[in-house]
Amino acid sequence: MKILLVSDTESRYIWDHFNKEKFKDIELVISCGDLKASYLQFLVTMLAVPVYYVHGNHDERYEKSPPLGCDSIDDTLLEHKGVRILGLGGSPEYRGGVFQYSEKEMQKRYKKLYKKIKKSGGVDILVTHSPAYELGDGEDFAHIGFKTLRNILDEWKPTYHFHGHQHLNYGQKNERSIQYGPTLIVNAHEYHIIDI
């Protein structure tokens, strides 16, 4: 299954110069947060495939006007074509935003899903806005990853972890993807196509 990952920065290549032929094999779009609702609506309209998203720390506007035709997978475990996808959006709490969480709050969100994850036999893809602690995160408080997410990777060993929040153009030594045990961690900044 070919997946288009998007996050944080609307791609001019996609939005201003859209060529359907170049995206004809895409079967699913996953947004890791902080994109305009109109951008996600554009993707679901032009590609005519499901668009799943988690909330980023700047997605308060989704509260009043969510992206139409797209599905939030925040705090959800769902199965898509036999693939188990767990969504946990948001960032560390640093200024009191709607989708900002303390480590304790993130742990609580995970615990609410634990029985469902166990019953389903685990997770294939973890979708988050923030990265996991020390796995592609930043050094400032707003961009330090969640230890809870790292615990999920350690316990369930998903095949993939897709995240945003840590822009690849921040000038730090950010990488598009890193391997952590059996898990391929992919930073979805702007856009990236992955075949799973």
Image: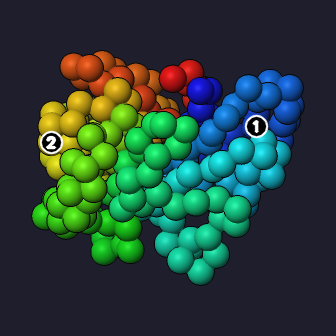
Which numbered marker is on residue 92?
A: none
Q: Which residue is mark 2?
A: 151
For image coordinates 63% across by 50% down, the residue present is 51
Distance between the alpha carbons at the discs numbered 1 and 2: 35 Å
Give the class, few, some or many, for how many residues have Cα within 10 Å of label 1's Cα (few <14, many ≥20): some
Q: Is residue 10 above or below residue 116?
A: above
Q: Is residue 6 left or right of residue 177?
A: right
Does label 1 or label 2 sit earlier along the sequence?
1
**94 or 50: which is nearer to us?**
50
Horizontal relation, residue 159 to residue 92: left or right: right
- SS at badge 2: helix
Q: Amino acid at mark 2?
A: Asn
Residue 21 visible: yes
Across and down, in percent, residue 116 comes to 27, 56
Image height check: is 156 above or below 79?
above
Instruction: Please say if 44 is above or below 178.
Output: below
**x and y, in percent, of residue 59 in the image:** 51, 65
Say which residue appears at 26% left-offset and 20% top-offset.
182
Within the image, what quadrant is residue 38 found in? bottom right
Count numbered badges in the picture.
2
Looking at the rendered image, the disc whose residue lies closer to the viewer, 1 or 2, is 2
Q: Quadrant of residue 164?
A: top left
**Residue at 68% over, 39% down:** 11
Residue 134 in percent (x, y) is at 19, 34
Q: Is residue 120 left or right of residue 188?
A: left
Q: Where does label 1 land, which residue?
A: 14
Q: Position of residue 167 (x, y in %)?
A: 45, 39
Residue at point 17%, 49% (across, down): 148
What amino acid type should be assigned to the residue bearing mark 1?
Answer: Ile
* Residue nearest the viewer, comparing 107 with 77: 77
Instruction: Point out the image quarter for the N terminus.
Output: top right
